[in-house]
Amino acid sequence: MTIECGELFLVNFNPGLGHEYQGKRPAIVIESNKQLKKSSLVTILPLTSNLDNRMADDIIIEADKNNRLKFNSLIKVYDIISFDRSRFINKIGMANKEVLTQIKKYLLKHFDLS
């Protein structure tokens, strides 16, 4: 299975511990395509359809025909995680450029790169 930056996948987060996400849920790939070729791990951000769970920097992604989400969702930017490719169940769709730009802007802030 090929995996590229900006794609949304259904990912198996089990087993999760404590406050980690659990179960099968959508996530967006945030690792560059160049880096994806070098590692068996893939860096992602989880999504939730619980819009009431929004934190200050979370990004709203509206369901559309390209990302093929069933519901408007939140990209949980504080929960950056890398998983083995075996956890990726199937591709859902692709995020638009605006969402990817918002993620990149947040990552600069998260890692104090600006």
Image: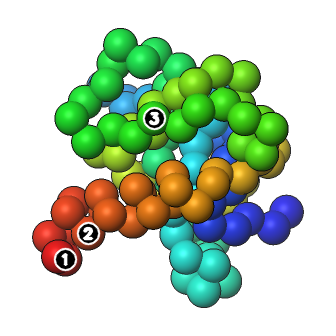
Up-down relation of residue 15 to residue 78 (above or below) = above
Query: Residue 60 has which mark?
Result: 3
Secondary structure under tag 2 reads: helix
Left or right: residue 58 versus residue 63 is: left
Quadrant of the drawing holding the N terminus: bottom right
- Circle nearer the viewer, 3 or 2: 3
Q: Earlier in the sequence, mark 3 or mark 2?
A: 3
Q: CA distance from mark 2 to mark 1?
A: 5 Å
Q: Earlier in the sequence, mark 2 or mark 1?
A: 2
Contact between marks 2 and 1 (CB within 8 A): the answer is yes
Contact between marks 3 and 1 (CB within 8 A): the answer is no
Secondary structure under tag 1 reads: loop
**Residue 2 visible somewhere in the drawing:** yes
Number of numbered discs: 3
- Residue at the extreme front of the image, as rendered: 98
The residue at the point 64 percent across, 21 percent down is 71
The residue at the point 20 percent across, 63 percent down is 109
Q: Amino acid at mark 1?
A: Leu
Q: How is the image coloured?
A: rainbow
Label 1, residues with CA under 10 Å away: few <14, some 14-19, many ≥20: few
The residue at the point 66 percent across, 31 percent down is 63
- Circle nearer the viewer, 3 or 1: 3
The residue at the point 32 percent across, 64 percent down is 105
**Residue 83 visible somewhere in the drawing:** no
Up-down relation of residue 11 to residue 18 (above or below) = below
| Image coordinates for residue 103, horizontal then vertical, percent | 41, 57
Q: Which residue is mark 2?
A: 108
| Image coordinates for residue 74, horizontal then vertical, percent | 45, 31
Q: CA distance from mark 3 to mark 2?
A: 18 Å
Query: Residue 72 has which mark?
Result: none
Q: Which residue is mark 1?
A: 113
| Image coordinates for residue 17, horizontal then vertical, percent | 37, 30
